[in-house]
């Protein structure tokens, strides 16, 4: 009887935030016209009714995601529904975004993780790593994060997260069991998501945003940036952030145990029990390496760059089913909640972009600092991109803010190079919301943390990020030879 009453009890907190999201949308959409944004050369940017609707959807989704009033995938469906029913964008465009190539890339990355788990590759890697790093939980954190960053040097951070995820599951199973929730597990998965972002800035192979930004920089500043020059300035930032995130996780997610006695020996024994690599393991490795190699070569050979990255990645999914490493039961185990999350995020990001609501925000924000000190202006760009990339694709955040910033920069005597690198540092590290990057959502699939915990820890990590950016802009990059002022 008491259990029945408990289940029937109204969750007023949930209903408050549910209605708050709807209220924010309606209040924004039906509000009076907002003032135009005006850039430094006098060009006006009007916020249309559709633009206000895009901002309203943005506020609704953020409220529902942060407070988890609905499953995150269902909130994503609401993004499409509100856009369509309020005529913000045509239904064909809105729901077409739900199968965008970027979403399929995430799907393919998750399938790779499934294969690594099913064939035993991740357990083998986990046992091997544990036999090296030992029994101290702090070193297990550090080893896991270092491996994640190393992999982002040569492959997209989404694929890295999907590959590392099952390895961390195997590690945590040895720590406390598969289903248990622990501070150690929370730190492992949240930390993995954060360092995947930190590592993704180091190389052009880590994410697509770098190539897009280089294109803008070439068109506006009239100079190109090479593959190795790009990595030269980002390498110390990415690895410094990895170490700082490790320190943060040791504070906010300090493991329940300092050591796991006997873990090193147990890992060696389990690795020995697995025996030699199986045929499916070797085949899976060959397919994955071939895919990664093809994606890497696209940065060096223009002819290969024409091939769509998502299509290349989905070839691996097809091959895994053709050679029967995977079957229909594996397809049914795909975390569709996570796929829907990114489908909705893609639709919302494109909504902000196509209605020019995001551009209106960027112009309003950056023109506030058009007469500021050069350092304040550069930091304001980094801050704006950091906030925006938590809500929309980081490629879109760069596309919105970088052109405006490069136009304003000459008025303040700021070199375009420091604008370029500052924007890309924060674009790669959306630490606060799950929709900011695929590794965030993949980590959430561990069920070790809530969206509110992710937001709170991400807020702390973002403060650290802004501190590192300030250090780089004012001290490190000038010492490395980067021009900062004209």
Image (tube, grey):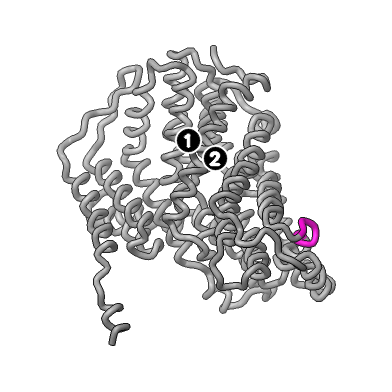
Q: Give the range drawn in magenta.
A: 129-134
Q: Is residue 133 magenta?
A: yes
Position in image of residue 245 (x %, y %): 59, 45
Check residue 209 in the rendering and tell me which mark sits there, or answer none: 2
Residue 202 seen: no
Position in image of residue 398 (x %, y %): 47, 35
- The residue under the point 35% across, 23% down is 367
User: In the figure, is residue 97 to the left or right of 86?
Assistant: right
The first of marks 2 and 1 along the sequence is: 2
- The residue under the point 81% across, 76% down is 273
State the SS at label 1: helix
Query: Label 2 neighbourhood size at 10 Å, few (<14), some (14-19), many (20+)?
Result: many
User: In the figure, is residue 249 to the left or right of 5?
Assistant: right
Query: Label 1 neighbourhood size at 10 Å, few (<14), some (14-19), many (20+)?
Result: many
Check residue 398 in the rendering and tell me which mark sits there, or answer none: 1
Position in image of residue 341 (x %, y %): 43, 59
Position in image of residue 36 (x %, y %): 24, 28
């Amino acid at each position: 009887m008491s259990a029945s009453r408990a289940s029937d009890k109204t969750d007023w907190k949930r209903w408050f935030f549910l209605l708050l999201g709807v209220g924010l949308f309606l209040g924004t959409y039906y509000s009076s016209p907002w003032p135009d944004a005006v850039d430094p050369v006098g060009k006006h940017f009007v916020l249309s009714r559709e633009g206000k609707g895009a901002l309203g959807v943005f506020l609704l989704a953020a409220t529902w995601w942060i407070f988890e009033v609905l499953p995150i995938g269902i909130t994503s469906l609401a993004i499409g529904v509100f856009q369509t029913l309020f005529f913000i964008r045509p239904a064909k465009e809105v729901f077409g975004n739900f199968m965008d190539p970027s979403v399929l890339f995430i799907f393919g990355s998750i399938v790779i993780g499934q294969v690594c788990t099913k064939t035993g590759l991740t357990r083998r890697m986990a046992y091997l790593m544990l036999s090296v790093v030992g029994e101290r939980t702090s070193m297990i954190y550090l080893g896991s994060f270092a491996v994640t960053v190393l992999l982002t040097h040569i492959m997209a951070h989404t694929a890295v997260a999907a590959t590392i995820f099952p390895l961390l599951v195997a590690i945590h199973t040895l720590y406390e069991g598969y289903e248990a929730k622990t501070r150690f597990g929370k730190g492992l998965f949240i930390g993995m998501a954060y360092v995947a972002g930190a590592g993704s800035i180091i190389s052009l192979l880590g994410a697509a945003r770098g190539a897009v930004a280089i294109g803008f920089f070439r068109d506006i500043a009239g100079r190109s940036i090479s593959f190795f020059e790009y990595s030269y300035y980002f390498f110390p930032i990415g690895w410094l952030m990895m170490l700082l995130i490790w320190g943060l996780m040791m504070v906010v997610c300090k493991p329940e145990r300092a050591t796991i006695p006997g873990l090193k020996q147990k890992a060696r024994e389990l690795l020995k029990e697995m025996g030699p690599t199986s045929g499916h393991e070797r085949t899976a490795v060959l397919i994955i390496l071939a895919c990664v190699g093809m994606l890497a070569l696209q940065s060096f050979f223009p002819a290969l760059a024409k091939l769509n990255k998502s299509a290349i990645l989905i070839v691996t999914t097809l091959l895994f089913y053709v050679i029967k490493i995977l079957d229909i039961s594996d397809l049914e185990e795909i975390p569709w909640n996570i796929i829907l999350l990114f489908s909705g995020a893609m639709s919302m990001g494109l909504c902000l972009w196509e209605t020019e609501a995001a551009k209106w925000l960027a112009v309003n924000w950056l023109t506030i600092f058009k007469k500021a000190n050069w350092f304040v202006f550069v930091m304001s760009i980094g801050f704006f991109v950091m906030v925006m990339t938590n809500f929309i694709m980081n490629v879109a955040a760069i596309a919105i803010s970088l052109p405006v910033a490069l136009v304003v920069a000459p008025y303040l005597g700021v070199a375009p190079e420091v604008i370029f690198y500052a924007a890309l540092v924060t674009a790669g590290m959306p630490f606060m919301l799950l929709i900011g990057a695929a590794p965030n959502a993949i980590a959430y699939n561990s069920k070790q943390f809530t969206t509110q915990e992710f937001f709170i820890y991400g807020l702390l990590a973002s403060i650290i990020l802004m501190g590192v950016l300030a250090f780089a802009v004012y001290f490190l990059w000038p010492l490395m030879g980067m021009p900062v002022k004209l």
